[in-house]
Image: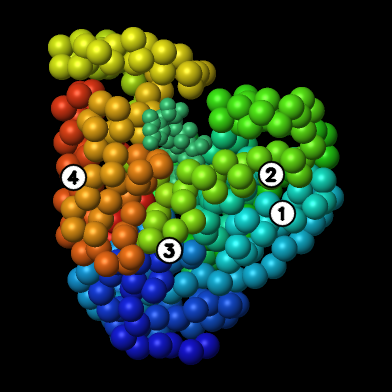
Amino acid sequence: MYIQENVKLADLTTFGTGGIARYFVNIETQADLLEALDFAKTKNIQSFIIAGGSNIVFSDNDYDGMIIRINLKGLELVGQMLHAAAGEEWDDVVQFAVDNNLWGMENLSSIPGLTGSVAVQNVGAYGQEAANIIDTVTVYDRQTGEIKDVAKSDCSFSYRSSIFNSTERGHYIILKIIFKLSTTPAPRIDYPEVIKYFSTKQITDPSLQQIRDAIVAIRAVKFSQTTDGKAGSFFKNLYLSPAEYNKMLEIIQAKKPELVTELEVIKNKFPTHDGHIKIPTAWVIDKVCNLKGKKIGSAQISETQALAILNINHQAKSADVKTLIDLVVSSVYEYTGKKPDVEPELVGF
Ligand code: EPU
């Protein structure tokens, strides 16, 4: 195991902001992990765990601790259970499942990052989410030093949330996930953009691989393949109670009456199962706040997906990114009465 010193945080994330980390280490075995944690303890410095770095925005401040990158590899099929080490590239895991005719993760194709993160934020897209396929998460317990299995029922999965990014944040390091997949076809092709894709291609009964191809194609357009730094969606969608929705409607009626009809249409486009109303924050940012394409320094709201902020040519200052985030939050609040949650982890701000 090689501990590097004075490493650029910007190179460790897909977004590409950040100062200098005092130490950095790449973990390839469980023994490496124990050694790295020991090193940090001996030096009495903090440590911070990262994986693919696709959902993290570092501030430009330096980090006087140790960044530990989980790069554990291993992929094994046991019947219909897929065991994937936390450091496996997520999209390779999805392709492996599809190649083995296993259903359940195909709609999560083309999502950047490593496998462990999928459990942390209960990754979801196009009608599927990690919680539906996770069986067990194997973790290292930083308090007791034990390796143990956390059953799905103990992960408290909800929209973009789990114990790993809420109540137990910092407690566990994810080593492996066991996914429960199925050879029984279970296509989820009811998401508006997916319906459109297959009807254009006149495919009525798509295969598993065709569904994966559809998602890859849809995402390629939305999350542009430019060299700009990106971290996916920067804001969670709005889940409103009927009372909160009525409040939003009143605000829109008063401030943007021309959008009332569109709001009533979009309200029914993304049904939920618990009586809440899902309003895409992208729609609010784009159509209500008119912030699509808004730029502060080299931080810009994407022209193709208003939920995404881009680090143009990797030149953005983290302070500009933060100003842009704050602008979106306050503007969405002004027109909806709700502050959207910020999706990526903001570190060092
Ligand atoms: N819309 C706009 N303007 C835009 C983009 C979208 O008006 O610029 C409207 C459209 O009406 C569209 C609706 O917003 O129908 C929803 O947009 P989209 O289908 O792109 O999905 P999203 O709700 O913005 C979520 C996830 C994405 C995931 C997609 C697809 C969150 C925070 N984001 O985005 O996840 O890929 O659905 O399922 O839930 C991520 O978390 O990093 C991520 C990329």
Whether ligand 1 has any atom under 8 Å from the Cβ at mark 2 is answered as no
- First in sequence: mark 1 or mark 2? 1
Name the residue that disc number 3 marks: 227
Q: Nearer the viewer, mark 3 or mark 2?
A: 3
Number of other residues with Cα within 10 Å of mark 2, as a class: few under 14, some 14 to 19, many 20 or more: many
Amino acid beneath label 4: Asp
- Residue 141 in sight: no
Q: Nearer the viewer, mark 4 or mark 3?
A: 3
Name the residue that disc number 4 marks: 326
- First in sequence: mark 3 or mark 1? 1
Gap in angstroms between the C-alphas marked 3 and 2: 24 Å
Q: Are marks 3 and 1 in contact (CB under 8 Å)?
A: no
- First in sequence: mark 4 or mark 1? 1
Q: Are marks 3 and 2 in contact (CB under 8 Å)?
A: no
x, y percent for residue 117: 51, 55
Residue at the location (79% across, 56% down)?
77
